[in-house]
Amino acid sequence: MAPGPYPELTVSSGNQSVTQSGAVSVAGQTTIVAGTGTITLTNSGNDFGGQIVAAGSAIALTDANALLVGVLNGDLGVVSLSAGGMISQIGIVEAGTLNLNGGDDVILSNTANRIGLLNSATITGDFTLANSLALNIYSLTADNVSLHVASGVTVGATHSITADQVTMNTGLLTVNGQVDGAVNILDGASLGGTGTVGNTTIASGGTLAPGNSIGTLHVDGDLVFAAGSSFDVEVDPLSSASDLVAVTGNVTINGGTVAHIGGAGDFLRTTRIILTTGGELTGAFAEVESIYAFLTPRLIYDYDADMVALELGRNDIDFVSSAATRNQTATAQAIDSIGIFAANPLYDAIALLPDDDALIQASFDALSGEIGATLQGALIENSRFIRDAMGQRLRTSPTGPSDDYVPLMGYAPSTEPMLPSPEPAGPTVWAYGFSSSGTAGGDGNAAARDHDIGGLLVGTDGLLGDWRVGLLAGYSRSGFEVEDRSSSGSSDSYHLGLYGGTAWGALALRTGLAYTLADLSTQRLVAIPWLDDSLSAAYGAQTLQAFGELAYAIETDGARLEPFVNLAHVNLTTDGYTEEGGPAALTVAGSSTGITFATLGARAELAFELGSIDATLLGMLGWRHAFGDLTPTVTQAFAAGDAFTIAGAPIASDSVVIEAGLDLALNDTATVALSYLGQISSETENHGAKATLAVSF
């Protein structure tokens, strides 16, 4: 601005404008008069301690904080708008005044930031505030205020609005301080907070939601609920506290008004006062709604004491009505059997769930303890590694009279007749390491399971007449996870086995018996509304299995094809146990499960020389069919209520089994074997590796 005691800038033509890109400082009696033109300020930091008079024109501010009406050189800033005047993108008014005298024609339009009224700043006149992202009011003095702020208006705890009437057209008016004047909440708008307002009317479509969460809103005057308005009440689940509206005057509740019960909490055994009046209470809410599936709300009117109370009770809808699967149904029935009068936190947690089938079903799944059943299937599947170790040892070792045995590794390209290789007379000591991981798919009831296993077996065997017999021992560790149930587990397993085999010419018989002792641990997280438990358990299990195999060898030069049929039976016994960690803990009964596996397939071997080492490529392809209790189950109970049975991820009824590997004869007495193992079905997939070292004496 030009220097001088009383500089003046006038823009009077309708289509002209003045643009100021730098900061503008206006002090003293300086007046900027805008006619029908526009003053555009593009930088922040414009300080006004004088006057801006915009009559039927506009002040356009392009930066977020471009207008600071405050104190400059001791002078208070004043901005006056009237008759269609507009300020777009206003910034901060501090210790200054906005004179708004154009009624609804005066608009403060802030589309990119917020309007803040600080310290002793005031707005005078009738005005409309529209299209603002947010409005934080510190002190506002006006005649009639009409607010159109979708994102809401907040009056701070130590701040106020002074007006004859404040009308909220859209958004939430949060009053934590004070509104001196009447408040009208129109269709689509809401009133909340913990401050004080004057005479208040909640129009049809408007909402009264006291508190910022749980809190009391004070009405210093009368309160009127129009037909079609809403009263949202929230309660504290850990106490008897709830939202409350405390009215000093009369309360009129017109027919058709809905009291909508929002939030969540322990309503079951508590009556809460939600509305009080120092004057007269008249009318009643036409209906009361709840967001809950299993609770029915009831309002209690005490016209003598001039108050309204809220009570929710259990309705006649069974928990199982929201269940969709076998496990959800069983869990729901068990929890419902506890009953409302037991004051059981598990029962209450389900009773307080909102009317949301997906959430209710997920809660039942979380509480079901499904991993206990699913883990059984994993243990049964893992038993195959012990059978495979015994079977492999018998396949790669001579059986029957030693002078009839010709191991495949004795073959090599040669024109000389094949001669039997002598079998060492002493015992053979061997070690077998294995590792595998995989997934068992869910079935629409139980969730999918991820698992892994690694272990080491050692054994010794020798010839006993026409039989080769041996012993093995070992250790393995397994991990399990059911991600969709926030559950996991592990197993430390100890193995003992006895095996033997013989042959009658090309026909071989192989058999074995093994016992496994497992130490199991499980962890699961139950995280549902109003219940958050971290549960764990430790218990034992035993596996006893036996297998038998018939195979017929078809020999060619340097190769062997061996069709086979294998039959195995696995019996798993698990101990009973009780989880620790909270009211969702389960006591699980011991159980016994038996599965039979039949595998039909063929093995192929091809001998060749790898440098100076005799080597054999081997492969196997088979079809495995399972019989028996393919869906493992457990029977269990919470601390209260009926016992119930849960099913885990099923064992695949039909699978393809695959093996591919390489055997290396290091010398006459030592052999190393490396193999890939696979088992694939429509529901499961397992991939692993094994390594074997055998040394004969």
Image (spheres, rainbow, N blue to C red):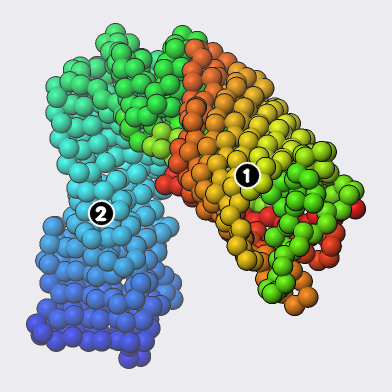
Residue 233 sits above or below residue 620 on the image: above
Along the horizontal axis of the image, is 597 left or right of 194?
right
The numbered dot on residue 318 is none
Q: From the viewer's perspective, is the residue at label 1 or at label 2 nearer?
A: 1
Q: Amino acid at mark 2?
A: Val
Residue that sits furthest to the bottom in the current view: 2
Seen at 41% across and 70% down, the residue is 71
Residue 432: in sight, yes or no? no
From the viewer's perspective, tell me whether residue 315 is left or right of residue 189. Answer: right
| Residue at 72% across, 46% down | 394
Q: Residue furthest left?
A: 14
Horizontal side of residue 696 vs 653, given as left or right: right
Q: Amino acid at mark 1?
A: Leu
Q: Position of residue 336 (x, y in %)?
A: 42, 16
Q: Residues within 10 Å of mark 2 (few under 14, many from 20)?
A: many
Give how far across and how far down residue 392 sits, in percent. 69, 49
Q: Residue, x 51% and y 14% (percent of image)? A: 643
Query: Which residue is identified by label 1?
Result: 507
Q: Which of 474 and 54 lies nearest the eye of the viewer?
A: 474
The picture places residue 586, in percent across and down from the top left corner, at 58, 22
Q: Which residue is mark 2?
A: 149
Left or right for 159, reference 124 = right
Q: Secondary structure at mark 2?
A: loop
Quick one: label 1, few (<14), some, or many (20+) residues within 10 Å? some
**In the rendering, at what x and y percent does residue 617 appear?**
63, 64
